[in-house]
Image (spheres, helix red, strand yellow):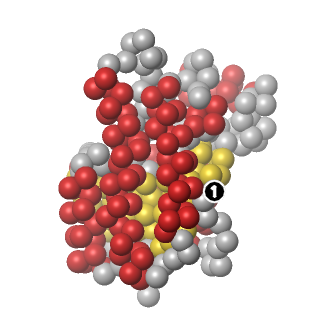
Amino acid sequence: MTKTAIVTGGGRGIGRGTALELAARGVDLALVDLIPEDLARTRAEIEALGRKALTYEADVADHARAAEVVADVMSHWGRIDILFNNAGKSNAKPLLEITEAEFDRTIAINLKGAFNYTHAAAPHMKAAGAGRIINMSSLNAHTGGVTGAVSKFSYAAAKAGLLGMTRALAKELGPEILVNAICPGVIKTERSNDLIRAREAELVRGIAAGRVGTPADVAQVVAFLGLSEPCFLTGQDIKIDGFQWMI
């Protein structure tokens, strides 16, 4: 039977790259994003690969909307095999400049958004006796970011919270549902491309693999966590950084 996946933030960047990788491996995709043009483009690319796609314009911080999206996916396909909680938002403001509303929004998107979709999807996975949840954390959850990082403490706090959620839910939802997190380092996407290009040579000097990452690098790991059989990994956070910050 065809497997299905929900990818939040699926319209572009890492979400798009992962959706296309999963589609190439025979998975049907439900994409959640805020930008309808991005959703339409990625949906067309998935369908060109011969897979089905559903699209939902939604803010992941909206708990009720997450429940609606998951219910609609179930009404169409009757199953959710993989949930990739990918949607996120950076925040470059330090403690003494950020407002309460800006801090709350960073947490709502990066941490609560993952809760919203997990809360909605997990009961269906439990009922089916199987499921994979992959949470998008960040290397910043471990390092706190560096001085020049585009995302500072509020983002690092949200992404670190995702690691705690991942470990706790791996215990709570297992053995039927495997829950893991990924921690990308410097990944070149539409959003980060200009920032990376300005200091790419400097960044590469601190990466053992000798280059910055791409959405395809992340997509390969998500596909492994979502599809590999058997899989004895749960409660883990996997760094996808080319072994970064060596110097």
Q: Quadrant of the C terminus?
A: top right
- Quadrant into which the N terminus falls: bottom left
Which residue in the structure is indicated by mark 1?
A: 236
Residue 57 spot, x, y in % from top left: 23, 52
Residue type at the position of mark 1? Gln
Q: Answer left or right for 199 relative to 195.
A: right
Q: Is residue 230 left or right of residue 151?
A: right
- Residue drawn at (55%, 64%), measured in percent from left and top? 171
- In the image, residue 24 sits, relative to residue 200, either above or below, namely below
Q: Nearer the viewer, residue 183 or 176?
A: 176
**148 in relation to 231, above or below:** above
- In the structure shown, which secondary structural element does the residue marked by tag 1 occupy? loop
> Residue 58 or 207: which is nearer the viewer?
58
Q: Is residue 145 visible?
A: yes
- Say if 239 sits above or below 134 in the image: above
Q: Which residue occupies 42% across, 11% down?
A: 96
| Residue at 61% over, 64% down | 234
User: Which residue is at the far bottom?
Assistant: 1
Q: Position of residue 166 (x, y in %)?
A: 53, 55
The image position of residue 128, as x and y in percent, is 41, 82
